[in-house]
Image: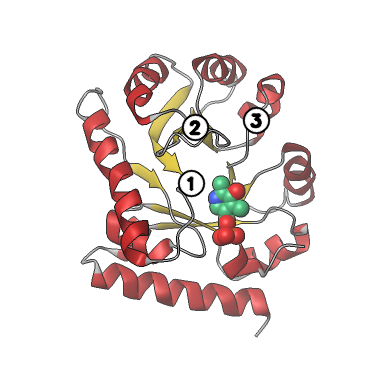
Amino acid sequence: MAPITDNLKTIKGQLKSAAEKAHRCVDDITLLAVSKEKPAQAIREAYLAGQHHFGENYLQEALDKINALSDLTIVWHFIGAIQSNKTQALAKQFDWIHTLDRVKVAEKLNRHRCDNPTPLNVCIQVNLDNEPNKSGVAPDECLALAKAIEQLPNLRLRGLMTLPKACDNFESQYLSFQRLTHLQSLISSHLSTPLDTLSMGMSSDFCAAIHAGSTLLRIGQAIFGERP
Ligand SMILES: *Cc1c(COP(=O)(O)O)cnc(C)c1O
């Protein structure tokens, strides 16, 4: 078996057993394959193995791959830092944006999405520990941003996303993710449509994320191998 196909099979097995341990339904957890810095051919291989959601971090690199793979029915997620002068391509070429953290950018995405028959799915990126070098809103600013996004007709606010402080033990990973889960239900209770997506968990911490309620895992290296 090709390594990517093999890796996908392994990850899906681990996902399934973590979901069972957490008494969760495996169908409630979407696997997003993070393909940054990997060639279009690697994505094609994963697609042929049944993987349909792909995440990219760098706009130009992503646009090249979207173009090269236009014969496939891929759901494209943008998970990188957003430059506010690049919102047009993001709004037109992607199905999901996970890294929204400013009203100004939300308004621009909304404007550029107006010709599309379906709204753009968005998640708010939360900087759980207010780390200065990280993007994302502070937890106490998240509700205000969610309410502003809710007013924009061409965006559909799906939930929250986080990249927590790296730590290598299950218990601290779990506690970080759980804070996002709690914030999500607090915010949901103030919105007219409840949020349904928690974008959290990567190659090194996805089991803890599943236990804390993740509905969308963003996994790169465990599928495609180490990045250069
Ligand atoms: C690169 C990246 C991932 C995937 O990380 P891996 O360690 O390769 O699984 C997930 N989320 C974001 C935002 C990333 O930039």
Residues at discs 1 and 2 in contact (Cβ within 8 Å): yes
User: Which residue is at 29% across, 37% downward?
Assistant: 184
Of labels 2 and 3, earlier in sequence is: 3
Q: Does residue 74 appear anywhere in the picture?
A: no
**Relative horizontal placement of residue 38, taking residue 51 as reference (left or right):** right
Give residue 97's quadrant in the image. top right
Whole-angstrom CA distance, mark 1 to mark 3, is 21 Å
**Relative horizontal placement of residue 206, taking residue 55 as reference (left or right):** left
Give residue 127's quadrant in the image. top left
Question: Residue 185 placed where, x, y %?
Answer: 23, 37
Which residue is identified by label 2? 136
- Quadrant of the image for the N terminus? bottom right
Q: Residues within 10 Å of mark 3 (few under 14, many from 20)?
A: many
**Relative horizontal placement of residue 93, taking residue 190 as reference (left or right):** right
Which residue is identified by label 3? 90
Whole-angstrom CA distance, mark 2 to mark 3, is 18 Å
Which residue is identified by label 1? 163
